[in-house]
Amino acid sequence: MKRLLIVADHTLVVQAIRMALRQTAGFQVVGFVDGRQDIRARLLETRPDVVVVDDMQDPEHPLERLREIVSTTPDAKALLLTVRTDEEWLDEAFEAGAEGAISKAVHPVALGTLLREIVSGRVVHRPRRAKPAAALADCPLTTRELEILRLAAHGLTNSRIARELWVTEQTVKFHLSNTYRKLGVANRTEASRYAHMNDLVVPHAQLAS
């Protein structure tokens, strides 16, 4: 049973979350705290496993509360319930400590299920940020190796990559072998994972530009 604390500035939000969780097993609501005020004392008192933070009227309030959750109860999962889903806002929320964000547009019945799936680690989504130029400069790959890695990470076969780049399939294999060695990985799957984790992958349509 996961202990859940609700942070909001309006009781209607609290009641909506409580009603949504009635049909979802696995959560015990341990309380509600006014999100317009410092919540560190309440966090230490309730020791929640999950904290649902409403976006509230003042956007600074949820960001402050998320930072307090991270600093006070770092093992608790902080989830943002928000009407805004623009990338800039979500970036700020994730930087402040949110581990997930749920749109208020979801059906109340689905809210409990989404909370359970996020807490279980089965739903993860974060806005992708552009890789800083300095980080790309530290990449050990040549321009051609990086180009081939990006295509491989998009799921293209060696023969397809060879056709796209107007090279032989053997050349593709040669560059991939060098890539594995430089990145310290064993195979194509690990290299693709490295590319995605380090934001080296760009939309396929941009590769030829």
Image (cartoon, helix red, strand yellow):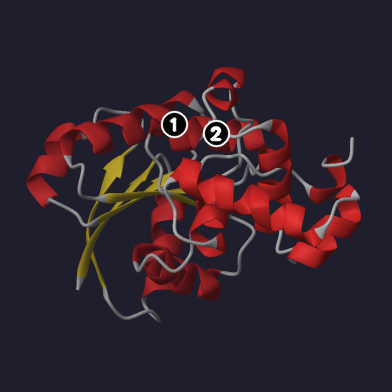
**In the rendered image, which quarter contains the C terminus?**
top right
Q: Residue 145 placed where, x, y %?
A: 67, 41
Q: Do the numbered discs 1 and 2 sit on residues whose CB atoms are within 8 Å?
A: yes
Q: Residues within 10 Å of mark 2 (few under 14, many from 20)?
A: some
Q: Residue 74 placed where, x, y %?
A: 21, 42
User: Camera-side residue: 101 or 34?
Assistant: 101
* Amino acid beneath label 2: Asp
Q: Residues within 10 Å of mark 1 (few under 14, many from 20)?
A: few
Q: In this view, does 12 lie to the left or right of 179?
A: left
User: Camera-side residue: 125 or 4?
Assistant: 125
Which residue is identified by label 2? 91
Identify the residue shown where x is 81% and y is 66%: 159
* Amino acid beneath label 1: Glu
Q: Is residue 154 left or right of residue 27?
A: right
**In the rendered image, which quarter contains the N terminus?**
bottom left
State the mark number for residue 95.
Answer: 1
